[in-house]
């Protein structure tokens, strides 16, 4: 059976803390900036194998729900941390968590734009996505600072932009893992996946922007508190 997208992600990110270029140190710095109270309820949209949500929940001594539409990713997440909630559907009511009140923190790293994520969140947002850093625009990728929750009373508290050198190290890891696996399994054709990554990264001019947001206290008091 051909390798699927979830298996490919698990393979390519083996040895990295998360299914993204984000390091533990960068993530912890953003959590420090958000200054959430212990016991926070966290929603991770596009949770992958659940590693990032697991770390955030442990650090905040809180609870968490991970959402991913890939059944294989959810299976990995459940096997990783059984005590958290894992599901395949996003919240359907704006500013409401799954089966309860709005989560204290919504994480959307490479999965949703800011407005969609903000519609699910209570007090805090953690966003991450590829951006274009060069003078030449790359179709489908924003410039840094463009993915912002324009409504709902948000303020920016921290920004980290991973530069091209850091991303090239990440991509070298990704390609190295996939190429090694393909060489050991000659019956599996991963040339399309490898070619797509090479085409995106070889051109250069890419960064990865992470932003941390808090709602203004006045908005919370008016719209979210009972």
Image (tube, rainbow, N blue to C red):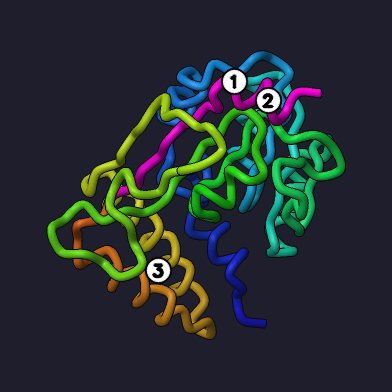
Label 1 environment density (alpha carbons within 10 Å; few <14, some 14–19, many ≥20):
few
In the picture, residue 205 is in which quadrant? bottom left
Query: What segment is highlighted magenta in the picture?
Result: 207-226
SS at badge 2? helix
Q: How many numbered dots are placed on residues in this image? A: 3
Crowd around label 3: few <14 · some 14–19 · many ≥20 (10 Å):
some
Few, some or many residues within 10 Å of mark 2 (<14, 14–19, 20+): few
Question: Mark 2 touching mark 1, by CB under 8 A?
Answer: yes
The circle drawn on residue 222 is 2
Q: Residue furthest right?
A: 99
Q: Residue 194 location in percent, x, y?
A: 38, 73
Q: Nearer the viewer, mark 2 or mark 3?
A: 2
Confirm whether the magenta stretch covers residue 174: no
Q: Residue at x 21, y 52 (%)?
A: 133
Q: Position of residue 107 (x, y in %)?
A: 58, 40
Of 175 and 143, which appears nearest the observer? 143
- Residue named by callout 1: 218
Tag 3 and tag 1, C-beta contact below 8 Å:
no
Q: Residue at x 54, y 54 (%)?
A: 112
Regarding mark 3 in the picture, which secondary structure is present there? helix
Circle on res. 179 = 3
Residue 202 image point, x, y percent: 22, 66
Q: Which numbered disc, 2 or 3, marks the residue that appears first in the sequence?
A: 3
Instruction: Between residue 40 and residue 101, name the one nearer to us.
Output: 101
Seen at 58% across and 52% down, the residue is 116
């Amino acid at each position: 059976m051909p390798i699927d997208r979830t298996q490919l992600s698990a393979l390519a990110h083996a040895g990295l803390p998360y299914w993204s270029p984000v390091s533990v140190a960068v993530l912890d710095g953003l959590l420090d900036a958000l200054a959430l109270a212990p016991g926070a309820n966290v929603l991770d949209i596009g949770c992958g194998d659940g590693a990032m949500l697991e770390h955030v929940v442990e650090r905040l001594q809180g609870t968490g729900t991970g959402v991913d539409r890939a059944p294989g990713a959810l299976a990995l997440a459940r096997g990783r941390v059984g005590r958290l909630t894992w599901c395949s559907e996003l919240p359907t009511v704006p500013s409401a968590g799954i089966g309860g009140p709005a989560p204290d923190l919504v994480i959307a790293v490479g999965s949703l734009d800011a407005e969609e994520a903000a519609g699910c969140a209570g007090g805090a947002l953690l966003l991450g996505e590829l951006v274009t850093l060069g003078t030449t625009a790359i179709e489908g990728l924003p410039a840094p600072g463009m993915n912002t929750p324009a409504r709902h009373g948000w303020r920016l508290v921290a920004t980290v932009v991973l530069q091209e050198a850091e991303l090239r190290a990440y991509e070298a890891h990704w390609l190295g893992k996939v190429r090694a696996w393909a060489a050991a399994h000659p019956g599996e054709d991963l040339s399309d996946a490898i070619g797509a990554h090479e085409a995106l990264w070889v051109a250069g001019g890419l960064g990865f922007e992470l932003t941390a947001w808090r709602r203004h206290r006045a908005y919370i008091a008016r719209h979210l508190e009972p």
